Amino acid sequence: MSLLELLIGIAVFSFVVSSAALLFAHARKAWSAGTDRHFIDSSARCALDTLARDMEASIADEKISFCFRDDRFGISSYGLTNSELNLITISQKPEHGERAARAVQYWVRESPNAPGRFELVRGCRKITPGPSGPYHSANWFEEPDEGGLGRPDSPSELGVVAENVALFRLAAADTSNRLARAYDSVLDGTSALPRSVDVYIEILPPEAARRAADMAGKGIDVSEYVENNSRRYAMVVSAENRHGHTPR
């Protein structure tokens, strides 16, 4: 074998090895992206299902309020304003003859275990019989006696619904069929659930969320990065129980 043939063989071998390595790297990247997408899609589906179940089982009248609005504590994720949701649900099973109702709240907070990243949480507790409870106070979710300005912080009452949330936004069709960013069944005078609620949520892939948190921590504007890397999910929940149950 001549030196030229040897050099050609080495060059061909190097090309094959580098091509295989490049192909493997692309395959690994595609696999990772597909895994992240499946994980995010599953997480978003679970979050939307949980929200839909609570809203479909909610009730409202002249005293029991169904309320959502911009977060009253001003918590924003990457500069975006999130919604908070407060409702009473009858999905709880009766215990010892008590009425099967729970006070439920949703809001976005900064993750205590991952600074700069955000999560959608669900607070849930049995309705208390006191004068500040949901049966007696339309703004029960703002009463200090109801868990700290209405937000339960006990680990046994608080659960994470979705991680790496970039935006959580609600809108409702009002009596004129316009979408409103805020709804309060008592203050608005409707004494009823909204006709429907549009739910919108944006979730970042884990690596993108880590990078966004790092960039934001350095004072870098991440709005464009978050917009380009977020995955978006939406649903519409109709209030079948809007005017209450009727006897059969």
Image (cartoon, rainbow, N blue to C red):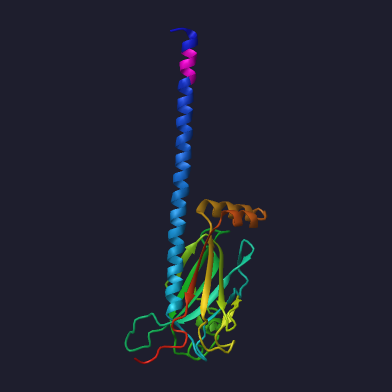
> Which residue appears at 50% of the width and 91% of the height?
136
Decide if residue 212 is in sight here.
yes
Count of numbered badges drawn on the protein: 0
Q: Which residue, as the protein is rendered here, is positioned at the far top?
A: 2
Q: Residue furthest left?
A: 96
Check residue 234 for magenta coloring: no
Q: Can you give x and y, in whole percent of width and height, for residue 47 in the image?
A: 45, 66
Along the viewing direction, whichever of 223 and 26 lies nearer the viewer: 26
> Where is 100 relative to 232, above or below?
below
- Residue 13 located left or right of residue 118: left
The answer to which image quadrant residue 124 occupies is bottom left
What secondary structure do most residues of the magenta stretch adopt? Answer: helix
Quadrant in the picture for the C terminus: bottom left
The residue at 51%/60% (across/down) is: 113
Up the image or down, 237 lies above or below 4; here it is below
Q: Position of residue 244 (x, y in %)?
A: 44, 88
Is 25 displayed left or right of 72 in the figure?
Answer: left
Which of the image's four quarters has the N terminus?
top left
Any part of residue 157 in sight: no
* Residue range corresponding to the magenta coloring: 6-11
Which residue occupies the foreground of this view, 41 or 135? 41
The magenta stretch spans residue 8:
yes
Q: Residue at x 45, y 49 (%)?
A: 34
Q: Position of residue 64 (x, y in %)?
A: 50, 88
- Residue 165: image x %, image y %? 53, 62
**Image quarter for residue 139?**
bottom right
